[in-house]
Each structure stands twice: as structure tokens, then as C-alpha cells.
Amino acid sequence: MINGLVMTMVLATAVGADAADRVTVESSPVRVILIGGFVSDPSQAQIHGTAGRGGNSGLYRLQNDLAQYDRVSAEYLNWNGTRTGEINSPKPPMATGIAKSVREVHAQHPEERLIIVGNSWGGHTAREVCEHLNVAPVIPVEHVIFLDPSSLARVKHGQREGELPSNVRRATNYYTRHLLSWRHWANEPRVENIDLGDPEHGFQVEGGPPYDSLIDTKGHIYAEWDERIHYDIRRRIARVRFEQKQTLRGD
């Protein structure tokens, strides 16, 4: 028992999926889908729970923190829609497969608010998933969180493809100043842009990762693991969780 709620491990909808890919908390008012980057498939030590705070996927670590400490139902997927350890699958389900899985879970738990977190190429995929969910029957997306999203080599010149779909209520865009990043998302009032390279936001500090660099990839790589960013993401998810609990109680 964790704070009176039972933590249960459930098999994902895909055949052969690892149970650790999805952690469901009873009566969770929100469901979080976390989509990793280009080479962020969790290590075997992470999957088996022996990696401590290390491993190969910062978002997979965030998934476990959300479930263990915040009592939130969370699910990790690779950028191409595969489960942990399957990123090199010859026929990955891509964003279409993720959207299909979301629809299946939503049909069972329509009261849950959906939050999607995407890092690097996972940010590109997150936007695509929202687009797939924006066709009838439309699935609303409460909050999309982009963590230094990138479309490099996925679209021409690596720029962001498409706009933010209308089914998204709000979005947060944490971005470095690296050339491979989407960087600032202009002319979109639903998006809160957070420049990680601006010291005023508290993430760019002396001796820390080079979030303000145009060419040093260390900042882009480190952002996936930055505990300060993870805490800020968890704070935003907690706000949605609180709002939905108030709604379900009729306050």
C-alpha cells in the first residue's frame, strides 16, 4: 500500500509487452504517456529495477517517480511506439500505434485526463499522437510537455512539422538553444515556452549543462535527466491531477 492506494503492475496492450512499461495506480485522475528520444530505450538494469537513478532513459526514470512518489498512472514508450527493449523492432507501431493504445485505455477510463511528455524525437512523436487523437472520436489532451523536442532528420531541415492540434488544451515547451531543437514555439498562446538557456528560469547555472549552446549537444542530452526539469514537470502534472480530483468530487 502507498498512501492508501494499491500499486498494480498491468500488462500493456501490445503482445509481449513488459509489465514495467505501464504502471497503473487505482483511481488515478490522470494518465501520463512518456515518449523517449532517438536512443533512449531503457537499459536492462532499468527495466529490472537494478539501475538506481542511472540507466539509459531519463523519461523511464521519470515514469517510475511519477508512479512511486506521485501516485500517477504512467506509461513509457520509445519514440517509434515500441516497448522497452524493442526499439529496433523491424515493424514499429509509431505514433499510430501509440494513439490506438491511448484510445483503448481511454475507452476503459474516460474520466482520466491525458498528459503526454515527449523528449527529443519523442517530442515530434508526441505532436503526431495528438494529431491522430484529433479525429473522431476526438480524445482531448489536457497537457503536452515537450522536453527539448527535435525533428532533425524526420522532416526537412529538422524543423517542427505541423501545428499544435486543436484537441490539446495546453502545452509546455522546455527547450535548449541547440540547432537541433525546435526552440521557441511562436504564435501559439497555448504553449508556455521555457528557455533552458536563460538563467532567469533557473536551469542554466554556472558549471551546469550548456543549455545556452547552439552546437554543444551535452545540453540536449542532459535535459532528459535533469532532476530540476523532472521536478518542474511533476509539479505541472500534480496541478492537473489536483484539478481533476476537484472535478470528480464536484467541487
Image (spheres, helix red, strand yellow):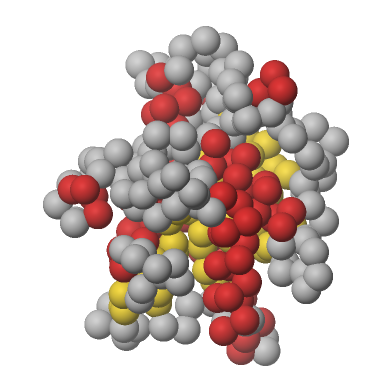
Residue drawn at 19 percent across, 56 percent down: 49
Q: Which residue sits at x=48%, y=30%?
A: 203
Quadrant in the picture for residue 242: bottom right
In the image, what residue occupies the spot 25% across and 82% down? Answer: 1
Q: Which of 83 and 147 is in front in this view?
A: 83
Q: Position of residue 190 (x, y in %)?
A: 77, 49
Q: Can residue 74 be seen in this view?
A: yes
Residue at image location 80% in from the left, 64% down from the top: 135
Specify whether 221 is left or right of 29.
left
Residue 53 lies in quadrant: top left
In front here: 176 or 95? 95
State how many labels appear: 0
In the picture, the quarter occupied by the C terminus is bottom right
Q: Please, is residue 206 above or below residue 186 in the view? A: above
Residue furthest front in the image: 90
* Pick the front one: 248 or 154: 154
Residue 152 screen position, x and y as percent? 60, 25
Quadrant location of residue 105?
bottom right
- Whether residue 62 sits left or right of residue 151 in the image: it is left
